[in-house]
Amino acid sequence: MLNLVLGILQFIVIGIICIWEVKQKSSASFLWATLMIMFGIMHLISVLVAGGSYSEKILWKASLFAIVFSLLYFATRLILSRKICCFNRKTFEEISKNKEVDEKYSIYYLIFFLTSIGISLRLIIRAGGVMNTSWSSGREIGLNESYVNIHFIFNILYFALGGLFCCALVNGKKAKTAFTFFCILVVVLIGRDRMAVLPILTGIIALVLFKIRRIKIKTIFFAMIAAVVVIFIVYGLRAYRWYGTIGNMLEQFKMSDFIEQIITFIKTDNGELGLRNYFYHFIENNNNFHGFGKGHTYIRMFLVYIPTRFSFGVKPTDFAQTMASAVGRGIGSSIHPTLFGDCYANLGMYGIFLGVLWGIIATIGDYLTLKFKSGGLKILAFILLSSMYVMIARGAVYNAFVKIAYGIPVLYFLQYLKKIKITYRKTYKQRKDRWNECEVQESIK
Protein backbone atom coordinates (compact mmCIF):
# COMPACT_ATOMS: atom_id res chain seq x y z
CA MET A 1 0.00 0.00 0.00
CA LEU A 2 2.83 2.43 0.88
CA ASN A 3 4.43 1.77 -2.49
CA LEU A 4 1.19 2.59 -4.34
CA VAL A 5 0.52 5.74 -2.29
CA LEU A 6 4.02 7.11 -2.86
CA GLY A 7 3.88 6.17 -6.56
CA ILE A 8 0.66 8.13 -7.02
CA LEU A 9 1.93 11.02 -4.87
CA GLN A 10 5.11 11.52 -6.93
CA PHE A 11 2.97 11.59 -10.07
CA ILE A 12 0.69 14.26 -8.55
CA VAL A 13 3.58 16.41 -7.28
CA ILE A 14 5.35 16.38 -10.65
CA GLY A 15 2.04 17.16 -12.36
CA ILE A 16 1.39 20.16 -10.09
CA ILE A 17 4.85 21.56 -10.82
CA CYS A 18 4.26 21.05 -14.56
CA ILE A 19 1.03 23.03 -14.40
CA TRP A 20 2.63 25.80 -12.33
CA GLU A 21 5.59 26.16 -14.73
CA VAL A 22 3.23 26.28 -17.72
CA LYS A 23 1.21 29.05 -16.08
CA GLN A 24 4.44 30.96 -15.45
CA LYS A 25 5.38 30.53 -19.15
CA SER A 26 8.79 29.35 -18.00
CA SER A 27 11.23 27.34 -20.10
CA ALA A 28 11.43 25.03 -17.05
CA SER A 29 8.05 23.68 -18.23
CA PHE A 30 10.07 21.46 -20.55
CA LEU A 31 12.17 20.13 -17.66
CA TRP A 32 9.13 18.95 -15.73
CA ALA A 33 7.11 17.82 -18.74
CA THR A 34 10.03 15.56 -19.71
CA LEU A 35 10.38 14.29 -16.14
CA MET A 36 6.64 13.57 -16.13
CA ILE A 37 6.95 11.42 -19.26
CA MET A 38 10.26 9.68 -18.46
CA PHE A 39 9.75 9.20 -14.74
CA GLY A 40 6.38 10.33 -13.36
CA ILE A 41 4.22 8.23 -15.67
CA MET A 42 6.66 5.38 -16.27
CA HIS A 43 7.47 5.02 -12.57
CA LEU A 44 3.78 4.89 -11.71
CA ILE A 45 3.38 2.11 -14.28
CA SER A 46 6.30 0.27 -12.64
CA VAL A 47 4.57 0.60 -9.27
CA LEU A 48 1.24 -0.66 -10.65
CA VAL A 49 2.81 -3.71 -12.32
CA ALA A 50 5.07 -4.42 -9.31
CA GLY A 51 8.23 -3.03 -10.93
CA GLY A 52 9.37 -6.04 -12.91
CA SER A 53 12.82 -7.08 -11.60
CA TYR A 54 12.92 -4.44 -8.85
CA SER A 55 11.46 -4.85 -5.36
CA GLU A 56 8.82 -2.65 -3.78
CA LYS A 57 11.43 -1.25 -1.39
CA ILE A 58 13.47 0.11 -4.30
CA LEU A 59 10.39 1.60 -5.94
CA TRP A 60 9.15 3.39 -2.84
CA LYS A 61 12.64 4.77 -2.21
CA ALA A 62 12.66 6.14 -5.77
CA SER A 63 9.20 7.64 -5.21
CA LEU A 64 10.25 9.23 -1.93
CA PHE A 65 13.39 10.70 -3.51
CA ALA A 66 11.39 12.20 -6.39
CA ILE A 67 8.72 13.63 -4.06
CA VAL A 68 11.11 15.39 -1.66
CA PHE A 69 13.37 16.62 -4.48
CA SER A 70 10.35 18.03 -6.33
CA LEU A 71 8.89 19.71 -3.24
CA LEU A 72 12.20 21.40 -2.44
CA TYR A 73 12.45 22.58 -6.04
CA PHE A 74 8.87 23.90 -5.96
CA ALA A 75 9.37 25.71 -2.64
CA THR A 76 12.49 27.39 -4.03
CA ARG A 77 10.67 28.46 -7.18
CA LEU A 78 7.71 29.86 -5.24
CA ILE A 79 9.99 31.94 -3.02
CA LEU A 80 12.21 33.28 -5.82
CA SER A 81 9.44 33.86 -8.38
CA ARG A 82 7.98 36.61 -6.21
CA LYS A 83 11.04 38.72 -6.95
CA ILE A 84 11.98 37.51 -10.43
CA CYS A 85 9.23 37.51 -13.08
CA CYS A 86 8.83 34.60 -15.49
CA PHE A 87 8.36 34.64 -19.24
CA ASN A 88 4.63 35.47 -19.35
CA ARG A 89 1.92 35.85 -21.97
CA LYS A 90 2.19 39.65 -22.01
CA THR A 91 5.86 39.42 -22.87
CA PHE A 92 5.10 37.05 -25.73
CA GLU A 93 2.34 39.30 -27.09
CA GLU A 94 4.78 42.22 -27.16
CA ILE A 95 7.33 40.07 -28.96
CA SER A 96 4.88 38.72 -31.54
CA LYS A 97 3.80 42.25 -32.46
CA ASN A 98 7.41 43.39 -32.83
CA LYS A 99 8.76 42.64 -36.31
CA GLU A 100 12.27 43.03 -34.90
CA VAL A 101 11.97 39.40 -33.80
CA ASP A 102 12.74 38.27 -37.32
CA GLU A 103 13.45 41.06 -39.78
CA LYS A 104 16.65 42.42 -38.23
CA TYR A 105 18.28 39.05 -37.65
CA SER A 106 19.10 37.90 -41.18
CA ILE A 107 22.79 37.58 -40.30
CA TYR A 108 21.83 35.05 -37.59
CA TYR A 109 20.15 32.85 -40.20
CA LEU A 110 23.36 32.93 -42.23
CA ILE A 111 25.43 31.92 -39.20
CA PHE A 112 22.99 29.11 -38.41
CA PHE A 113 23.18 27.85 -41.99
CA LEU A 114 27.00 27.85 -41.96
CA THR A 115 26.97 26.12 -38.55
CA SER A 116 24.65 23.37 -39.82
CA ILE A 117 26.82 22.86 -42.89
CA GLY A 118 29.97 22.79 -40.72
CA ILE A 119 28.55 20.11 -38.39
CA SER A 120 27.45 17.96 -41.33
CA LEU A 121 30.63 18.35 -43.42
CA ARG A 122 32.80 17.32 -40.45
CA LEU A 123 31.01 13.96 -40.36
CA ILE A 124 30.77 13.53 -44.12
CA ILE A 125 34.49 14.19 -44.73
CA ARG A 126 35.66 11.92 -41.89
CA ALA A 127 33.29 9.10 -42.96
CA GLY A 128 34.30 9.34 -46.61
CA GLY A 129 30.92 10.38 -47.99
CA VAL A 130 27.31 11.00 -47.04
CA MET A 131 26.32 7.35 -47.45
CA ASN A 132 29.02 6.22 -45.01
CA THR A 133 28.04 8.49 -42.13
CA SER A 134 26.74 6.77 -38.99
CA TRP A 135 26.21 7.38 -35.27
CA SER A 136 29.20 5.22 -34.31
CA SER A 137 31.57 7.04 -36.68
CA GLY A 138 30.46 10.36 -35.20
CA ARG A 139 31.18 9.08 -31.67
CA GLU A 140 34.65 7.91 -32.68
CA ILE A 141 35.44 11.33 -34.11
CA GLY A 142 34.25 13.02 -30.92
CA LEU A 143 36.38 10.79 -28.67
CA ASN A 144 39.54 11.70 -30.58
CA GLU A 145 39.00 15.47 -30.49
CA SER A 146 40.32 17.93 -27.89
CA TYR A 147 38.11 19.76 -25.35
CA VAL A 148 37.86 22.94 -27.44
CA ASN A 149 37.49 22.20 -31.15
CA ILE A 150 35.58 23.52 -34.12
CA HIS A 151 32.75 21.02 -33.53
CA PHE A 152 32.36 22.25 -29.95
CA ILE A 153 31.98 25.81 -31.25
CA PHE A 154 29.54 24.71 -33.97
CA ASN A 155 27.52 22.77 -31.40
CA ILE A 156 27.17 25.79 -29.12
CA LEU A 157 26.14 28.05 -32.03
CA TYR A 158 23.68 25.43 -33.29
CA PHE A 159 21.68 25.31 -30.06
CA ALA A 160 22.13 29.02 -29.28
CA LEU A 161 20.58 29.93 -32.64
CA GLY A 162 18.22 26.96 -32.93
CA GLY A 163 15.39 29.20 -31.72
CA LEU A 164 15.41 30.97 -35.10
CA PHE A 165 12.90 28.31 -36.17
CA CYS A 166 10.54 29.58 -33.47
CA CYS A 167 11.28 33.22 -34.39
CA ALA A 168 10.28 32.53 -37.98
CA LEU A 169 7.08 30.81 -36.81
CA VAL A 170 6.19 33.75 -34.56
CA ASN A 171 6.28 36.18 -37.47
CA GLY A 172 4.73 33.83 -40.00
CA LYS A 173 7.83 33.82 -42.21
CA LYS A 174 7.19 30.67 -44.23
CA ALA A 175 10.44 30.80 -46.23
CA LYS A 176 12.62 31.24 -43.15
CA THR A 177 10.66 28.61 -41.24
CA ALA A 178 11.29 26.11 -44.06
CA PHE A 179 14.93 27.21 -44.28
CA THR A 180 15.68 26.63 -40.57
CA PHE A 181 13.69 23.38 -40.63
CA PHE A 182 15.84 22.16 -43.51
CA CYS A 183 19.08 23.11 -41.71
CA ILE A 184 18.02 21.21 -38.59
CA LEU A 185 16.83 18.21 -40.62
CA VAL A 186 20.21 17.93 -42.38
CA VAL A 187 22.07 17.92 -39.04
CA VAL A 188 19.71 15.28 -37.61
CA LEU A 189 19.86 12.96 -40.64
CA ILE A 190 23.64 13.19 -41.04
CA GLY A 191 24.64 13.13 -37.37
CA ARG A 192 21.87 10.86 -35.94
CA ASP A 193 21.89 12.99 -32.77
CA ARG A 194 18.32 12.84 -31.46
CA MET A 195 18.89 15.95 -29.36
CA ALA A 196 19.56 17.97 -32.52
CA VAL A 197 15.84 17.84 -33.35
CA LEU A 198 14.92 19.64 -30.11
CA PRO A 199 14.86 23.21 -31.56
CA ILE A 200 11.99 22.11 -33.82
CA LEU A 201 10.02 20.25 -31.14
CA THR A 202 10.48 22.87 -28.41
CA GLY A 203 9.84 25.69 -30.91
CA ILE A 204 6.44 24.32 -31.94
CA ILE A 205 5.37 23.47 -28.39
CA ALA A 206 6.58 26.87 -27.12
CA LEU A 207 4.14 28.68 -29.43
CA VAL A 208 1.27 26.81 -27.80
CA LEU A 209 2.74 27.35 -24.34
CA PHE A 210 2.87 31.12 -24.82
CA LYS A 211 -0.79 31.29 -25.81
CA ILE A 212 -2.20 29.18 -22.96
CA ARG A 213 -4.31 31.32 -20.61
CA ARG A 214 -5.73 28.55 -18.44
CA ILE A 215 -5.16 24.82 -18.19
CA LYS A 216 -8.23 23.20 -19.76
CA ILE A 217 -9.15 19.69 -20.86
CA LYS A 218 -8.10 20.51 -24.43
CA THR A 219 -4.73 21.70 -23.09
CA ILE A 220 -4.19 18.35 -21.37
CA PHE A 221 -5.34 16.56 -24.54
CA PHE A 222 -2.83 18.54 -26.62
CA ALA A 223 -0.09 17.71 -24.11
CA MET A 224 -0.90 14.00 -24.42
CA ILE A 225 -0.86 14.12 -28.22
CA ALA A 226 2.37 16.13 -28.21
CA ALA A 227 3.97 13.60 -25.84
CA VAL A 228 3.03 10.67 -28.09
CA VAL A 229 4.34 12.46 -31.20
CA VAL A 230 7.61 13.44 -29.48
CA ILE A 231 8.13 9.89 -28.18
CA PHE A 232 7.48 8.45 -31.64
CA ILE A 233 9.92 10.90 -33.25
CA VAL A 234 12.66 10.24 -30.67
CA TYR A 235 12.29 6.47 -30.98
CA GLY A 236 12.05 6.82 -34.74
CA LEU A 237 15.44 8.52 -34.77
CA ARG A 238 16.77 5.76 -32.54
CA ALA A 239 15.50 3.17 -35.01
CA TYR A 240 17.03 5.19 -37.86
CA ARG A 241 20.39 5.08 -36.03
CA TRP A 242 19.98 1.29 -35.74
CA TYR A 243 20.47 0.90 -39.51
CA GLY A 244 24.08 2.11 -39.26
CA THR A 245 25.04 4.07 -42.38
CA ILE A 246 22.65 5.95 -44.65
CA GLY A 247 23.66 3.55 -47.43
CA ASN A 248 22.51 0.57 -45.37
CA MET A 249 19.23 2.27 -44.54
CA LEU A 250 18.44 3.00 -48.19
CA GLU A 251 19.12 -0.64 -49.07
CA GLN A 252 17.32 -2.30 -46.15
CA PHE A 253 14.55 0.13 -45.18
CA LYS A 254 11.01 -1.22 -44.91
CA MET A 255 8.32 0.82 -43.21
CA SER A 256 6.83 -2.23 -41.48
CA ASP A 257 10.23 -3.21 -40.02
CA PHE A 258 10.92 0.39 -39.03
CA ILE A 259 7.65 0.73 -37.09
CA GLU A 260 8.11 -2.72 -35.56
CA GLN A 261 11.56 -1.70 -34.31
CA ILE A 262 10.11 1.44 -32.69
CA ILE A 263 7.41 -0.61 -30.94
CA THR A 264 10.06 -3.09 -29.76
CA PHE A 265 12.14 -0.29 -28.26
CA ILE A 266 9.10 1.04 -26.39
CA LYS A 267 7.92 -2.39 -25.16
CA THR A 268 11.37 -3.38 -23.87
CA ASP A 269 12.09 -0.05 -22.14
CA ASN A 270 15.02 0.33 -24.54
CA GLY A 271 15.49 4.07 -24.76
CA GLU A 272 14.27 7.22 -23.05
CA LEU A 273 11.28 5.56 -21.38
CA GLY A 274 13.59 3.03 -19.71
CA LEU A 275 16.21 5.43 -18.33
CA ARG A 276 14.62 5.29 -14.86
CA ASN A 277 15.87 1.66 -14.58
CA TYR A 278 19.42 2.95 -14.07
CA PHE A 279 18.08 4.98 -11.14
CA TYR A 280 16.54 1.81 -9.68
CA HIS A 281 19.84 -0.03 -10.21
CA PHE A 282 21.76 2.59 -8.25
CA ILE A 283 19.26 2.43 -5.37
CA GLU A 284 19.37 -1.36 -5.35
CA ASN A 285 23.15 -1.26 -4.92
CA ASN A 286 23.06 1.67 -2.47
CA ASN A 287 25.36 3.70 -4.75
CA ASN A 288 28.14 1.23 -4.05
CA PHE A 289 30.11 2.01 -7.21
CA HIS A 290 33.46 3.64 -7.87
CA GLY A 291 33.19 7.45 -8.09
CA PHE A 292 29.58 7.62 -6.83
CA GLY A 293 28.35 9.86 -4.02
CA LYS A 294 30.98 12.57 -4.55
CA GLY A 295 28.96 15.16 -6.47
CA HIS A 296 31.16 14.91 -9.56
CA THR A 297 28.50 16.24 -11.96
CA TYR A 298 28.08 19.40 -9.90
CA ILE A 299 31.79 19.94 -9.36
CA ARG A 300 32.17 19.80 -13.14
CA MET A 301 29.30 22.27 -13.56
CA PHE A 302 30.96 24.68 -11.12
CA LEU A 303 34.24 24.40 -13.08
CA VAL A 304 32.53 24.41 -16.48
CA TYR A 305 34.81 27.04 -18.03
CA ILE A 306 38.00 25.20 -17.02
CA PRO A 307 39.10 22.30 -19.29
CA THR A 308 39.56 19.07 -17.31
CA ARG A 309 43.19 18.71 -18.40
CA PHE A 310 44.04 22.16 -17.00
CA SER A 311 42.23 21.75 -13.66
CA PHE A 312 45.17 20.00 -11.91
CA GLY A 313 42.93 17.06 -11.08
CA VAL A 314 40.25 19.15 -9.35
CA LYS A 315 37.69 18.74 -12.13
CA PRO A 316 36.44 15.13 -12.28
CA THR A 317 35.97 13.18 -15.49
CA ASP A 318 32.54 13.00 -17.11
CA PHE A 319 30.27 11.36 -14.53
CA ALA A 320 28.02 9.99 -17.28
CA GLN A 321 30.92 7.70 -18.22
CA THR A 322 31.43 6.72 -14.57
CA MET A 323 27.77 5.70 -14.37
CA ALA A 324 28.16 3.73 -17.61
CA SER A 325 31.04 1.75 -16.06
CA ALA A 326 28.81 0.99 -13.07
CA VAL A 327 26.30 -0.82 -15.31
CA GLY A 328 28.95 -2.66 -17.32
CA ARG A 329 29.21 -0.43 -20.39
CA GLY A 330 32.47 -0.16 -22.37
CA ILE A 331 35.10 2.58 -22.32
CA GLY A 332 33.82 5.87 -23.72
CA SER A 333 30.16 4.92 -23.19
CA SER A 334 27.80 7.09 -21.18
CA ILE A 335 24.37 6.65 -19.63
CA HIS A 336 21.71 9.06 -18.41
CA PRO A 337 19.44 7.90 -15.53
CA THR A 338 17.03 10.90 -15.59
CA LEU A 339 17.70 13.97 -13.44
CA PHE A 340 16.51 12.13 -10.33
CA GLY A 341 18.89 9.25 -10.98
CA ASP A 342 21.80 11.59 -11.65
CA CYS A 343 21.19 13.48 -8.39
CA TYR A 344 20.97 10.20 -6.46
CA ALA A 345 24.16 8.84 -8.04
CA ASN A 346 25.98 12.08 -7.17
CA LEU A 347 24.97 12.42 -3.52
CA GLY A 348 22.82 9.44 -2.56
CA MET A 349 19.67 10.34 -0.64
CA TYR A 350 21.22 13.74 0.10
CA GLY A 351 20.68 14.41 -3.60
CA ILE A 352 17.16 15.53 -2.70
CA PHE A 353 18.66 18.88 -1.65
CA LEU A 354 19.80 19.45 -5.22
CA GLY A 355 16.14 20.29 -5.83
CA VAL A 356 16.94 23.67 -4.26
CA LEU A 357 19.85 24.17 -6.67
CA TRP A 358 17.71 23.35 -9.70
CA GLY A 359 15.03 25.73 -8.46
CA ILE A 360 17.67 28.47 -8.36
CA ILE A 361 19.01 27.54 -11.82
CA ALA A 362 15.50 27.61 -13.34
CA THR A 363 14.85 31.04 -11.81
CA ILE A 364 18.16 32.41 -13.07
CA GLY A 365 17.26 31.05 -16.52
CA ASP A 366 13.98 33.01 -16.49
CA TYR A 367 15.78 36.12 -15.28
CA LEU A 368 18.48 35.97 -17.97
CA THR A 369 15.85 35.40 -20.66
CA LEU A 370 13.93 38.51 -19.64
CA LYS A 371 17.11 40.61 -19.45
CA PHE A 372 17.59 40.47 -23.21
CA LYS A 373 16.55 43.75 -24.80
CA SER A 374 15.05 42.41 -28.03
CA GLY A 375 12.22 39.96 -28.54
CA GLY A 376 14.23 37.83 -30.95
CA LEU A 377 17.01 37.20 -28.45
CA LYS A 378 14.43 36.43 -25.74
CA ILE A 379 13.03 33.66 -27.93
CA LEU A 380 16.50 32.33 -28.78
CA ALA A 381 17.35 32.14 -25.06
CA PHE A 382 13.98 30.56 -24.26
CA ILE A 383 14.39 27.80 -26.86
CA LEU A 384 18.03 27.20 -25.87
CA LEU A 385 17.00 26.70 -22.23
CA SER A 386 13.93 24.63 -23.16
CA SER A 387 15.99 22.27 -25.34
CA MET A 388 18.65 21.87 -22.68
CA TYR A 389 16.07 21.25 -19.94
CA VAL A 390 14.83 18.27 -21.95
CA MET A 391 18.38 16.91 -21.97
CA ILE A 392 18.83 17.63 -18.26
CA ALA A 393 15.56 15.85 -17.42
CA ARG A 394 16.75 12.71 -19.21
CA GLY A 395 19.96 12.88 -17.16
CA ALA A 396 22.45 14.38 -19.62
CA VAL A 397 23.04 17.09 -17.03
CA TYR A 398 26.60 18.27 -17.65
CA ASN A 399 26.45 18.18 -21.47
CA ALA A 400 23.30 20.29 -21.43
CA PHE A 401 24.67 22.68 -18.81
CA VAL A 402 27.76 23.30 -20.97
CA LYS A 403 25.58 24.45 -23.84
CA ILE A 404 23.70 26.82 -21.52
CA ALA A 405 26.91 28.08 -19.93
CA TYR A 406 28.37 28.99 -23.33
CA GLY A 407 25.17 29.57 -25.31
CA ILE A 408 23.73 32.35 -23.12
CA PRO A 409 26.99 34.41 -23.22
CA VAL A 410 27.03 33.94 -27.01
CA LEU A 411 23.54 35.49 -27.21
CA TYR A 412 24.58 38.36 -24.93
CA PHE A 413 27.63 38.89 -27.16
CA LEU A 414 25.35 39.09 -30.20
CA GLN A 415 23.22 41.64 -28.33
CA TYR A 416 26.37 43.64 -27.58
CA LEU A 417 27.42 43.61 -31.25
CA LYS A 418 23.94 44.77 -32.23
CA LYS A 419 24.17 47.60 -29.71
CA ILE A 420 27.54 48.69 -31.14
CA LYS A 421 26.07 48.59 -34.65
CA ILE A 422 23.10 50.76 -33.63
CA THR A 423 25.40 53.23 -31.81
CA TYR A 424 27.68 53.43 -34.83
CA ARG A 425 24.73 54.11 -37.15
CA LYS A 426 23.41 56.87 -34.89
CA THR A 427 26.86 58.47 -34.60
CA TYR A 428 27.39 58.26 -38.35
CA LYS A 429 23.97 59.79 -39.02
CA GLN A 430 24.62 62.62 -36.55
CA ARG A 431 27.98 63.39 -38.14
CA LYS A 432 26.44 63.28 -41.60
CA ASP A 433 23.67 65.67 -40.52
CA ARG A 434 26.22 68.08 -39.04
CA TRP A 435 28.30 67.90 -42.21
CA ASN A 436 25.22 68.68 -44.34
CA GLU A 437 24.37 71.62 -42.07
CA CYS A 438 27.89 73.00 -42.46
CA GLU A 439 27.68 72.66 -46.23
CA VAL A 440 24.33 74.51 -46.26
CA GLN A 441 25.74 77.32 -44.09
CA GLU A 442 28.80 77.61 -46.31
CA SER A 443 26.65 77.82 -49.43
CA ILE A 444 24.54 80.57 -47.83
CA LYS A 445 27.65 82.56 -47.02
Image (cartoon, rainbow, N blue to C red):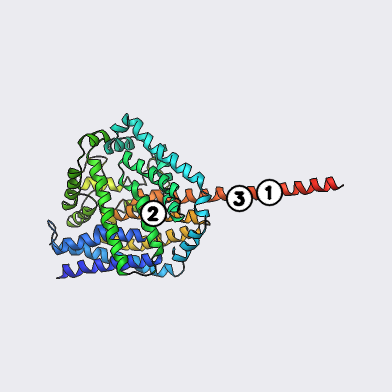
Residue 203: which disc?
Answer: 2
Residue 422: which disc?
Answer: 3
What is the distance, in whole Å, between disc 1 and disc 3 at their CAs? Answer: 11 Å
Q: Answer above or below: position of 398 versus 142.
A: below
Residue 429: which disc?
Answer: 1
Badge 2 density bin: few <14, some 14–19, many ≥20, Cα 10 Å = many
Amino acid type, callout 2: Gly
Q: Secondary structure at mark 2?
A: helix
> Seen in the image, is 248 located left or right of residue 28?
left
Q: Secondary structure at mark 1?
A: helix
Residue 435: x %, y % from top left: 75, 46
Badge 3 density bin: few <14, some 14–19, many ≥20, Cα 10 Å = few
Question: Do tag 2 and tag 3 residues touch (Cβ < 8 Å)?
Answer: no
What is the distance, in whole Å, between disc 2 and disc 3 at their CAs? Answer: 28 Å
Closer to the camera in the image, 145 or 204: 204
Discs 2/3, front: 2
Which residue is pictured at 39% across the width and 42% down the height? 183
Residue 291: x %, y % from top left: 26, 49
Badge 1 density bin: few <14, some 14–19, many ≥20, Cα 10 Å = few
Amino acid type, callout 3: Ile
Q: Which numbered disc, 1 or 3, marks the residue that appears first in the sequence? A: 3
Residue 371: x %, y % from top left: 50, 59
Amino acid type, callout 1: Lys
Question: Do tag 1 and tag 3 residues touch (Cβ < 8 Å)?
Answer: no
Residue 350 can be seen in this image: no
Closer to the camera in the image, 321 or 420: 420
Which residue is pictured at 41% across the width and 54% down the height? 383
Residue 374: x %, y % from top left: 52, 56
Closer to the camera in the image, 2 or 312: 2
Residue 166 can be seen in this image: yes
Question: Residue 220 lies in what quarter of the image?
Answer: bottom left
